[in-house]
Image (cartoon, rainbow, N blue to C red):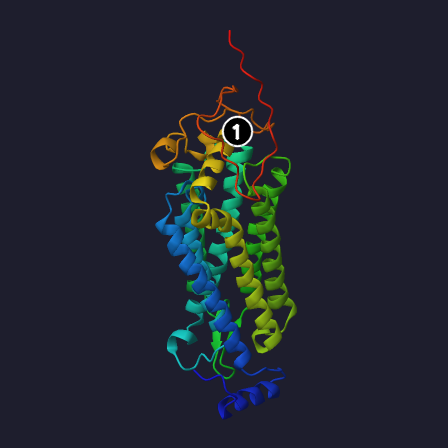
Amino acid sequence: MSFAYTPDEQDRVMIAGFLGLRLDPIGYVDLSTIIVLSTMYLVEFVALCYQLRHRDYLPLKAKNVPVMFSLYFGGVSWLLGDIFSGGLVHLKQSPVLKNCTFTVIWLRVCIGAYYVTSIFALRCFSLYYVFYAGKPFRGRVMLLSLCATILSIVLFGIVSSVLPSTMTIRYEEILDMCYYGKGYVASVIAVIWCIWVFTAYMTWRMRNVAFCFNERVEMMALFVIMLSVVTMNTVCLFAVSVYPASLGWRTALLYTNHVGASTGYWIVMFEPTYNCIFNRNEYLQYWINILKEDHMEREYGYSSEINTETTLNWSEFSELPSKANSHYPSSHNVTTASLSGPAVSPPAGHERPEVFVPEQKEP
């Protein structure tokens, strides 16, 4: 596939000019965009392989590595759909690329944008379910939520595929690009905005909730990232006339979509991954201590696994008073006991406020 300014590309630019459209030719800036974003996803793939191998490490397990792995493939699908339908490559060389129903509706919209934003929203809902409602987000609840999300995406894709191409998306051979129907674009953007509104609502409901780890940062970051992505897509698809024809707009949209998705992924996964590599046992003991302190073992579902999945001596942890959080009940007794073995300091950057524990006097 050529990125040089060939005679065929010159003809395409000239034809677009006759039709009143300023068309920036496909060139090496587009190639560099593809290389940069592909490299970014390759690095994430290496990290995901490591995370899958160590998925039983409790801080990683709490992030639901298999779901994050599926999120990665949603991002790859989104990238391919953006590249094929965003004016970065020539489509006429392959019948698969000219099939805009496949590249746009399935790769870009359903498996890509809808799935990625829905998983981010589902992550926010899981935080709401655990920290606001005080219930563990696992088992049947998690499975039903994930299945409902996937089913709604599949139904949207099927309906979009059976509609006439004049109503949704079609291939324009004279310009060698996919042309979007405005009504279909409006429906796609409306769904993404609904997903963002749901995320915003969950974020607002949890504004005063005390979290165990960095969940507040995750929640606010996903909120901002989704807002940026939705706004950028809305501008490109509505305010810009045929955005794939503009080098600046198509490049900006790709970087916004995929740097945003990658940033959201790393905000969720970086801390447990980094500490699994460099501070494995120290961070694990710190992590379990925080669960004990905040009385969240039941919500995370790990209280019965502590003694079987760790190699350190966890037999007697301090039962510290829990944070004031009126949104979830605690089934634990608030007592105090001494730690057995030497005290372990939290990893750098994870210090917690000191808690006063009164001395136990002999009767």
In the displayed orientation, state which residue is furthest to the front.
342
Residue 345 in the image: x percent, y percent?
52, 36
Q: Quadrant of residue 297?
A: top left
Q: Nearer the viewer, residue 169 or 275?
A: 275
Q: Nearer the viewer, residue 183 or 272?
A: 272
In the displayed orientation, state which residue is furthest to the right.
239
- Please say if 309 is above or below 16: above
Element carrying mark 1: helix
The amino acid on which the numbered mark 1 sits, given as a three-letter code, is: Glu
- Please say if 339 is above or below 141: above
| Residue 226 as seen in the image, left or right of residue 49 | right
Q: Quadrant of residue 355?
A: top right
Dot 1 alpha-carbon crowd within 10 angstroms: few under 14, some 14 to 19, many 20 or more:
many
Q: How many marks?
A: 1
| Residue 2 as seen in the image, left or right of residue 357 | left
Q: Which quadrant holds the N terminus?
A: bottom left
Residue at 46 percent of width and 32 percent of height = 299
Residue at 55 percent of width and 44 percent of height = 348
Residue 239 in the image: x percent, y percent?
65, 68
- Please say if 356 is above or below 151: above
Q: Quadrant of residue 324?
A: top right
Residue 19 in the image: x percent, y percent?
60, 85
| Residue 221 as seen in the image, left or right of residue 101 | right
Does any portion of residue 193 appear in the rendered image?
yes
What residue is disc 1 on?
A: 293
